[in-house]
Image (spheres, helix red, strand yellow):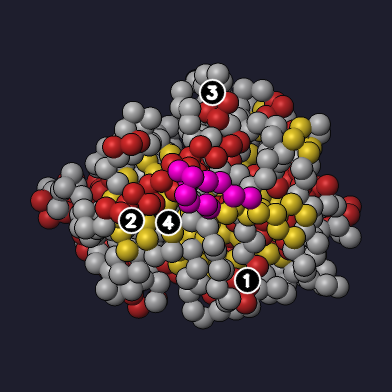
Amino acid sequence: MNAFRCRAISVCAAIVVGCCWITEVASRAGAAERPNIILMMVDDMGFSDLGCYGSEIDTPNINRLAAGGVRFAQFYNTARCCPTRATLMTGMHPHQTGIGHMTNSPTHVNDDSVPAYQGYLNRNCVTIAEVLRESGYATLMAGKWHLGFHDQKLWPLQRGYDKYFGCIPGATRYFFPTHPRGMTFGNEAIAKPESTTDEAFYTTDAFTDYAIRFIDEHQQAQSEKPFFLYLAYTAPHWPLQAFEDDIAKYRGKYKMGWDELRKQRYQRQIELGLIDSQWELSPRPESVPAWDSLKPAKQDEMELKMAIYAAVIDRIDQNVGKLEKYLTEHDLLDNTLIVFLSDNGACAEGGILGRGEFYDVEKRNQQNDNSYGEAWANASCTPFRLYKHFAHEGGTSSPFFMHWPNGVKQQADWYQSPAQLIDIMPTLIDVAGATYPTTYQGNDILPGDGVSLRSAFTGEALGRENPIFIEHEHNAFIRDGKWKLVGRNVAKPRRIDAAQWELYDLEVDRTELHNLAADMPEKVKEMAAKWKAWSKEAKVYPKP
């Protein structure tokens, strides 16, 4: 049985909140073979952008894997790329790892005088690769790292991975990645990466092909050992760049505009059973113009942007299919746990209508920041409001599923227990029969607050006793049962005691349209006190 250690924190000397973490895990699978594990994450993809979550985008391979396992209706991220990655890799809240805000970038180095915001993983946390390698797993990675840039000791091979190919910083061009946002193989920068297909070099293809190569090399050399693969696509993060054939598949499909697209996705989500029909579709943001108010030329430009975005996601699905085919042909699929998620909500950066060049193909594919803008991001996050960066549902709700024929029961119904990123590491440690250390390489390792999601494998309720907490860029929430306390800029140190929190009953209002804070001040006070106590435990404060 799994052993859990619980610890408590006091809230104003009156409220006690238990926080649990696996410190030692023995295999619950009995004599069953330990699974291979593939952790697959996409970048800046909204809640409704997969076919299995209500989209019109063609994602048959992802849909099939999701349908063959357990699909989560309420899974939470931490609202942005690098904090999500920090939590995903360590099972810790991002501030506890040193990435409370952003990582260091090619052009910026954070002030490390506040350790929680230093911009790279500290040594008081362990990565899932470090833990699984100690347990006998081969550890492989392809894709986006975004957990430390300026010193090689912060890179994947120095944080538990045996093999690596990908992008160390947070974004790169798909066709022409160049220094300092180029490709890295192991610890070596690649000046001009070669294509891995008979088409032009494209990051999504290359990440998948290197992942397959790494697995194949492992199977030939050490097939008796299970493998762990972290496949972290940069897609569909800006700059939006795709193959012309993929774009042509979607050109013209978005002439109805974002208003109609949101209605169509909302209706499909109801039909899928993903959302409750009593949850109202959130209104179009006041900043976003009605589609019909745009002139035809602007409509055509915006339609092209969404077609390219869809093409980028389509290419992800093609590559997921390629990986699945390899696993099937080599008799690996049945005993491989595949975990799939997006790192945050859709990205509204680049203004209301986006930015960059889209008509000129050559210029588009050389750009560094092409984006589709707030208007389409709002559609990607259907039925919710707000996006990446915010703690509301649009920013923090991820499509998430787990597929493992030998270990996860195929479930027709959506799994409804709320879960979060800190639960992934204890889940993987659980199925691997690994041990979470209290010290590693001479450093004390902090315990975490996550719980194993094993109960979801058979559709049993998670039974979470503790709230879910998030803070990012002063935006925050606490989810406690059906109640969610959330706010923008509520975590600024000078505003925390006078924060304008919003309170929602998510059973009847998951789209967060009916704020109950004024009607239930005592509930707000109670939940705000819990959040404040957690913020101290999680090292949200002091802020730089």
- Mark 1 or mark 2: whose residue is earlier in sequence: 1
Q: Main secondary structure of the magenta part?
A: strand
Q: Nearer the viewer, mark 1 or mark 2?
A: 2
Q: Secondary structure at mark 4?
A: strand
For badge 2, the amino acid type reads Lys
* C-alpha span from label 4 to label 3: 27 Å
How crowded is the residue under tag 2: few (<14 C-alpha within 10 Å), some, or many (20+)?
Answer: some
Which residue in the structure is indicated by mark 3? 114
Q: Secondary structure at mark 2?
A: helix
Viewer-closest of 482 and 55:
482
For badge 4, the amino acid type reads Arg
Give coordinates of residue 374: x percent, y percent: 28, 45
- Mark 2 or mark 4: whose residue is earlier in sequence: 4
Image mark for residue 479: 4
Marks 3 and 1: CB-CB under 8 Å? no
Q: Nearer the viewer, mark 2 or mark 4?
A: 2
The boundaries of the magenta stretch are: 7-17
